[in-house]
Image (cartoon, rainbow, N blue to C red):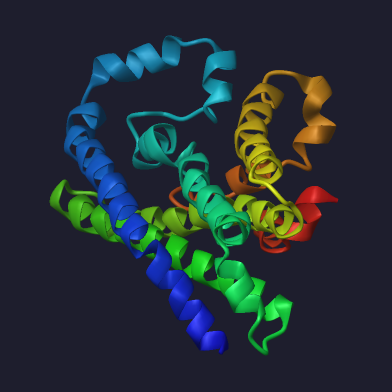
């Protein structure tokens, strides 16, 4: 029964997975095509250096003329927020949405524990999100090799895709938990959207306002930003915080 539930969950999102993969891959292709001209643009490098520190801090202090800085500013700074649209939406559809359509009643009528139903729902969501991240990683790998990005940086960019997917799943998990308890779409939608958008904005503002630093330390976006695969910066503390979703909302 568990495999059947997992398979059904994957079938329900297969069209969305293909659409999201194609959309993100197309955007990544445009970024890859533009990267060589950005990399060799001395005027742009001088312009970036002239920007106020506060503005650079909001975007993580990225240097657009480097591989890591370019893709951080143009893709990975907000990839989790983009993927959160997918994870939050599908989390709502697989809980409250199925209750409203009556499909959940048929599932719960079967001899299967409720925890297993929702575990399979989250499992299908995790697999689907990983597939989208894999499609994006493959696009960056193939395109990166074409435009002359070093192999080590290509591997790091691919790892960054999965890191973004991990944070998006944190938002999806919170939404699904609320959706399992709620009787309408409003509560999980508000929670999911508030977490995804709110943590992103707070993370950016906290880089400029020292008074927000205590709250910044508990922000899952901050944990995500602690790791920069291209620069070789890996925070096991940050990754541990994302993997243990409970700590994000304690």
* Quarter in which the N terminus is drawn: bottom right
Residue 234 in view = no
> Residue 66 or 121: which is nearer the viewer?
121
Count every numbered label the image shows and give the total: 0
Position of residue 225 relative to residue 146, above or below, is: above
In-image side of 133 versus 245 (left or right)? left
Residue 141 in view = yes
Choose top left, top right, bottom left or bottom right for residue 173.
Answer: bottom right
Identify the residue shown where x is 38% and y is 71%.
11
In-image side of 55 versus 150 (left or right)? right
Estimate the x, y position of residue 81 in percent, counting from the top left: 52, 40
> Residue 109 or 62: which is nearer the viewer?
109
Estimate the x, y position of residue 184 in percent, counting from the top left: 68, 47
Identify the residue shown where x is 42% and y is 71%.
10
Estimate the x, y position of residue 64 in percent, counting from the top left: 36, 29
Identify the residue shown where x is 52% and y is 53%.
87
In-image side of 146 versus 226 (left or right)? left
Identity of the residue furthest to the left in this view: 146
Identify the residue shown where x is 58% and y is 52%.
92
Position of residue 122 relative to residue 228, above or below, is: below
> Residue 67 or 239: which is nearer the viewer?
239
Estimate the x, y position of residue 55 in percent, counting from the top left: 54, 15
């Amino acid at each position: 029964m568990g495999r059947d539930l997992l398979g059904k969950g994957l079938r329900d999102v297969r069209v969305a997975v293909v659409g999201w993969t194609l959309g993100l891959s197309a955007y990544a292709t445009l970024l890859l095509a533009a990267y060589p001209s950005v990399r060799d643009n001395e005027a742009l490098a001088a312009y970036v250096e002239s920007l106020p520190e506060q503005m650079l801090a909001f975007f993580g202090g990225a240097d657009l003329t480097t591989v890591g800085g370019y893709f951080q500013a143009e893709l990975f700074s907000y990839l989790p927020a983009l993927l959160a649209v997918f994870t939050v939406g599908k989390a709502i559809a697989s809980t409250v949405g199925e209750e409203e359509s009556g499909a959940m009643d048929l599932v719960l009528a079967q001899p299967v524990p409720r925890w297993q139903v929702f575990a399979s729902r989250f499992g299908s969501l995790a697999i689907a999100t990983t597939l989208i991240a894999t499609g994006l990683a493959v696009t960056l790998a193939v395109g990166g090799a074409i435009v002359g990005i070093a192999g080590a940086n290509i591997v790091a960019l691919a790892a960054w895709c999965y890191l973004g997917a991990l944070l998006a799943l944190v938002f999806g998990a919170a939404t699904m938990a609320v959706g399992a308890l709620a009787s309408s779409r409003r509560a999980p939608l508000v929670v999911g959207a508030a977490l995804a958008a709110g943590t992103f904005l707070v993370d950016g503002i906290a880089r400029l306002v020292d008074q927000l630093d205590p709250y910044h330390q508990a922000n899952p976006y901050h944990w995500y930003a602690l790791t920069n695969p291209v620069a070789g910066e890996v925070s096991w503390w940050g990754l541990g915080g994302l993997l243990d979703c409970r700590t994000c909302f304690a």
